[in-house]
Amino acid sequence: MKQMDEVQKRLIREVADLHDIPEGAYNFRANGESVGRQTTANIDITTKTERSGIDIRIKDGTKKESVHIPVVLSQSGLQETVYNDFYIGKDCDVLIVAGCGIDNCGNQDSRHDGVHRFFVGKGSHVRYVEKHYGSGDGAGRRILNPVTEVYMEEGSTMEMEMVQIKGVDSTERTTLAELAADAKLIVRERLMTHGQQTAGSVYKVSLNGDGASADVVSRSVARDTSFQKFDACIIGNAACTGHTECDSIIMDSGRILAVPSLEANNIDAALVHEAAIGKIAGEQLIKLMTLGLTEAEAEEQIINGFLK
């Protein structure tokens, strides 16, 4: 493990909740290069030869193991695209923690584009956590554009937690998923924008096998003059069930555009979408203020609970 400075360590804590070297497999990346890697008997990590990125291979039957692959940028002006492929065998139960943190104190834009592909084997369960975070007082922007592709075999389950709460000036998040019979996808997105930040979230989920299901839920808050767009499409190509929901709080002069859509190509596809955008209810503020909180403190309490 190469020595990381205090800024990089702080970013690792923010995006991966790591205060020390984790147990299990990991690959740490800082300012465009690998700074630490560990494999296990069941999880192998290798560097791609044709382009920047890694391959993570998880053996059949691997249970209760984890992979951490955080990325941090603390150098202003650095821009990179990384391709990471995950091959999860049959009958596995694993945790994968990714995420990127950018600290930009300079005048040039810093940008990380990560393309993650997941090939989830039959009967496997994967929990995937991806957090994005930005900091630094420079004029350069912090830009993150993650692409996630998920290919799920029969009877597999994937739970995705997608979080971006602070400091990212511009992001375009794209998630594509294809599910075989009896596969199950659960997505929980939490997002907050402030200042002049922009954030786009695109989900396109194809339910291709009988018994496949998807539940995609986004909760977001737009503050100041920031802008968000949530664009989710569930495609039912079999006897399946799908649900997408956008629940958003708008504040100040923020703007939010919700574009939920459904495409049913099978008579037994049962698909539902919901969208709600509104301001914080006045009675909620009043109730908390009667307990001694200021209006600003009450707003923060409501937002924290909403995004929890």
Image (cartoon, grey):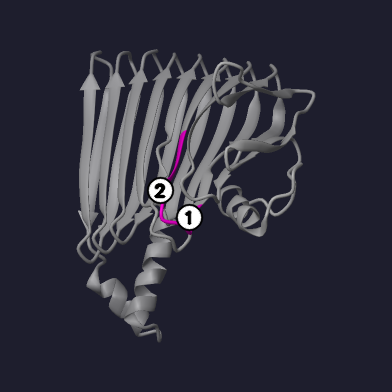
- Coordinates of residue 216 in the picture (x, y in percent): 37, 36
The magenta region covers: 103-113
Is label 2 in contact with label 1 (beta carbons under 8 Å)?
yes
Q: Residue at x 64, y 31 (%)?
A: 94
Quadrant in the picture for the N terminus? top right
Camera-side residue of 22 and 38: 38
- The quarter of the picture where residue 95 lies is top right
Q: Position of residue 212 (x, y in %)?
A: 41, 20
Q: Position of residue 10 (x, y in %)?
A: 61, 57
199, above or below 56, in the image: below
The reply, left or right, for residue 197 in relation to residue 157 is left
Residue 109: mark: 2
For mark 1, give the secondary structure. loop
Q: Is residue 108 magenta?
A: yes
Residue 149 has which mark?
none
Above or below residue 95? Residue 196 is: below
Q: Can residue 293 be seen in this snapshot?
A: yes
Gap in angstroms between the C-alphas marked 2 and 1: 8 Å
Query: What residue sits 29% from the left and 26% below the top?
Result: 234
Q: Nearer the viewer, residue 92 or 6?
A: 6
Identify the disc placed on residue 104: 1
Q: Which amino acid, by three-letter code, is at mark 2?
A: Asp
Q: Amino acid at mark 1?
A: Asn
